[in-house]
Image (cartoon, grey):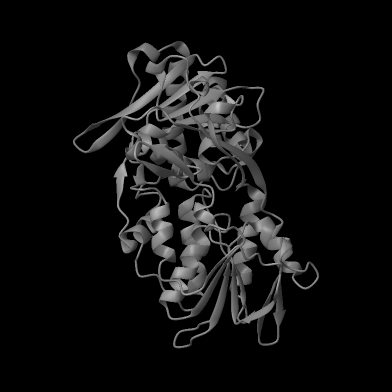
Amino acid sequence: MVVLAGMTVRVAVVGSGIAGLTAAWLLDRAGHRTVLFERHQRVGMDAHSAEIPTGPSDVGVDVPIRVFNRKLWPTLSALADELGVVSRPISVASSFSETTRQTFFRYGTVTAAKVSFPYVPPRYLSPRALAIISGVAQLRLAGGLDLENGTLNDRPLKAYLAEGEYSETFVEDFLYPAIGTICTCSRDSVAEYPARVIIESLFDIFLAGRLRRFTGGTRQIVRRLVANLPDVRLGTGVQQVTASDDGVDIKLADGVERFDHVVIATQANHARALLSPTAFAPEHDALERFRYDQLDVVVHTDRALMPRAERDWASVNFFVSPEREQAASTLWVNRVEVEFEGQSPVFQTHNPLWAPEANKEMLRVRLQRPVVNADSLRGYEMLQALHREPDRRIWFVGSYATRGMPLLESGVRSSESTVAHLGVRAPWSTPS
């Protein structure tokens, strides 16, 4: 472990997603001279937000929209509390439709005595819906027991479901579309996800009725994390990172700067591109094990990307197509952003089945999202071994760089654990 307690050093953080922002904030708070580099002109976590008119002013919407709950996102929640960012509960109602936009299943939640339960309206109780409900109950019971008994290991989800003889209707019409949207990955990637990771998280995300949204969006966290950082360099791309005898050199377009430590907070594939494959062979070996899937996100007002009948609309609307590799879904922004309540409908569609009308499209972005599989789990272990090296000066953080689903929580948690190697402690305590 490299311990910097009692020392003041110069640290570069490359990348300003949630992991980079958290690392920079923690390091600066500990008194280190921290420089944050971001190649975009806006801070990375807020780089793709959309400004949407709502009467007298514009309101920013996250792209993609981020939600959380305190059980599965404890470190993010602790960070938000420390920053004074408030949140509110949101609707978790979801619909599932054919590509014809005909809805075949929908559920919401009801709350009694402070406990939330999933609820399916009677008009959706068809044989297909009952097969989905039966599969949910089976996975919750059998999967919960397997998780408790420690028998899941890292078996791929596809193999686990086949062993349990789960119905095709449950798997193809509910489970794979839901996970593909949560994890923003392809059908094949969902099949290779460790079953343990899915079962640990799925029910608390989709069925517990506990999802929340930061008031004003995640840009509120961004603003407070950046507010007191003394040196934030937007529009400044790092070209290369090299080690020297007494530090780490960062090559920029206009020269080279030396730092005592560098925290690389980019995607794994981007981090690999910054490092020489010969000088950093172990790092390359670890980083190349992380794979990314493509995600297309469109913000628009086109109702043709929602269920055909408005009574079927929900906060999240999934579209099931066995011919498509990517999960398609549309979020009804008005249901998750309080500023849009009472306004004309605004939507955010992930991997749309077809393009919205040109005059109804507000923003379109293409992102890459990390995938979790057996290879990435091995890559994580390799990174942890590198971080334990006594003279290490180059560090890696990101949603890919920890166990579990690659969500905002993962990014914050990876930075918290990484800066701990440098003797920096977060001002909160969270469950292990």
Q: Is residue 143 left or right of residue 89?
A: right
Residue 376: horizontal and vertical position, in percent? 64, 53
Q: Where is residue 159, by image quadrant?
A: top right
392 shown above or below 109: below
**Which residue does the image show at 37% across and 29% down from the upper left?**
93
196 shown above or below 14: above
335 shown above or below 410: above
Q: Is residue 165 left or right of residue 243?
A: left
Residue 314: horizontal and vertical position, in percent? 40, 26
Q: Where is residue 261, by image quadrant?
A: bottom right
In the foreground, 103 or 34: 34
49 shown above or below 309: below
- Furthest toward the right, the residue is 278
Q: Is residue 207 visible?
A: no
The quadrant of the picture occupied by the C terminus is bottom left
**Which residue does the image show at 38% across and 24% down from the upper left?**
107
Residue 323: horizontal and vertical position, in percent? 67, 22
In the foreground, 223 or 121: 223
- Furthest toward the left, the residue is 113
- Number of marks present in the image shown: 0
Q: Is residue 380 left or right of residue 242?
A: left
The quadrant of the picture occupied by the N terminus is bottom right
In the foreground, 95 or 344: 344
Residue 274: horizontal and vertical position, in percent? 71, 65
**Which residue does the image show at 41% across and 71% down from the upper left?**
228
Q: Is residue 420 visible?
A: yes
